[in-house]
Amino acid sequence: MYIFPCQIELYDNRDRLVRDQWVKIMKLRIVREKLEECYHSQSVNHMQNCRELVERYLRDLPEARMGGRPPFLKCLSMGLFGKKEPQAAPLDPAYILAEAQECLKEKNLEGALAKFDELCALPVQSPLPLLSRATCRLQLGKYEGVLEDCEKVLQFLNTDLGGHEEEQCTTVHSLALLRMAKAHKELGQMDEAKSALMRRNAVEHKLGRDGSGQDGDGGQGDQALAEEWKEKGNAEYKQGNWAEALAHYRNGLGYDMYNAKLHSNACMALINLKRWSQALKHAEQCIVLEPEWVKGYYMKGRILSSESKLEQARDVLRKADAMEPGNAKIAELLAEVEARVDYVESRLRRRKPRADEPAKAEDAGDSGTEQPVEDVDSDEDYCEDGTCRPKKIKLSITRKDIFNTAVDVGAALVGVALVWWF
């Protein structure tokens, strides 16, 4: 059973709405009493002297009622004074929440989704309507919409759910990331699902609500130990002791596995040790935990470049350069990778044979030069301008052909010698 975050706002605002409506109704009652007194005192002059009270009463009436106003008052406003019906005031978002709540009680998910769409169209400065719509879309199987809503939720500040935890999610961001993980899983995007789930765990871990801390202290004890190991690793790293620094960083990750800086430092130590595959894993973890931190993309691009995966490195570095255009290190590495890519592509273009040239026999085992080409007459005649002559074709003889022929001749001679000897 899903808990819709908008229900939290509905419960919290219920008393305020009742109080506001009661105040409006009481104000309208006062205006009506004054209007009745005016009718009795002015008698036949009430049309002129009570006009202001009547207009005020008709203007405030829609806001003080739940569902419009009686038909005779509508006729009074349109016919008696020759004015158009005043437009109804914009519907309060709390009313839309209440209607969405009714749809959810009736298990009418399509109706609830329509109400959430209407609510999200309003200029609301809250992530809860978007999160509720994502929850509704998830149950309806509209997974692309779930990802879109959750990305918008992550742009808001991370706030608590107000004691309405669901699936061990205590904040808006952690619940949005959990919804994203489920949507990616249903779409078959397992890597993205794991990434979103790890980010969700990191959010809860930082707040100490994943069971690692006590009384919501954020796991400060473990984080302090992780920080100590990081300082020890930094001291070894500055002295060039990469292996010792890596050991300290890994000890720190044992206490705080969601620390992006520890993953980054461990990655740099592995890069200096030229252990590319392990370094790539730490770089990817760094990107998952801190998607807005450009260092993770820089390290990944550097590793891919060292492994000669130039096109992948170029794509990653371009993304990093777009995130932080003024970074000199990224620009320098990107220029180097693009130069290497251009060089490889130019070499491939030169090796590719042209369409108007005959294909030459490839010599896979020997890179030596070819022997002079001999012209050999073929059995077919070549006729041009009424004159026919034997057609000549060109054959290429390589060192490998000569070597194979020599081996065959030598084997034949050895066989003849053995037969003669025995």
Image (tube, rainbow, N blue to C red):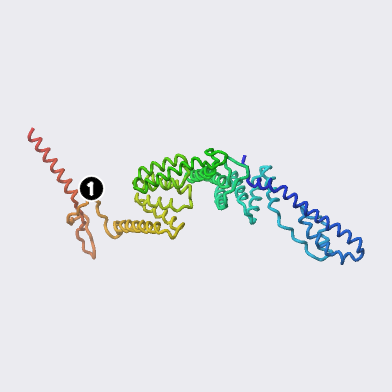
Q: Residue furthest left?
A: 421
Instruction: Label 1: state its secondary structure.
Output: loop
Identify the residue shown where x is 78% and y is 58%: 60
Measured from the top left, where is residue 291 in percent x and y? 48, 50
Tell me if 178 is positioned left or right of 299 in this view: right
Q: Quadrant of residue 350?
A: bottom left
Front one among 358 and 338: 338
Residue 164 in picture, x, y percent from top left: 63, 42
In-front residue for pair 252/399: 252
Q: Quadrant of the N terminus?
A: top right
- Give the quadrant of the C terminus: top left
Q: Position of residue 355 (x, y in %)?
A: 30, 59
Q: Residues within 10 Å of mark 1 (few under 14, many from 20)?
A: few
The three-letter code of the residue at mark 1 reads: Gly
**Residue 60 seen in render:** yes
Residue 141 location in percent, x, y?
57, 45
Residue 29: image quadrant is: bottom right
Q: Residue at x 70, y 53 (%)?
A: 92
The residue located at (56%, 41%) in the rendering is 216
Residue, disc 1: 365
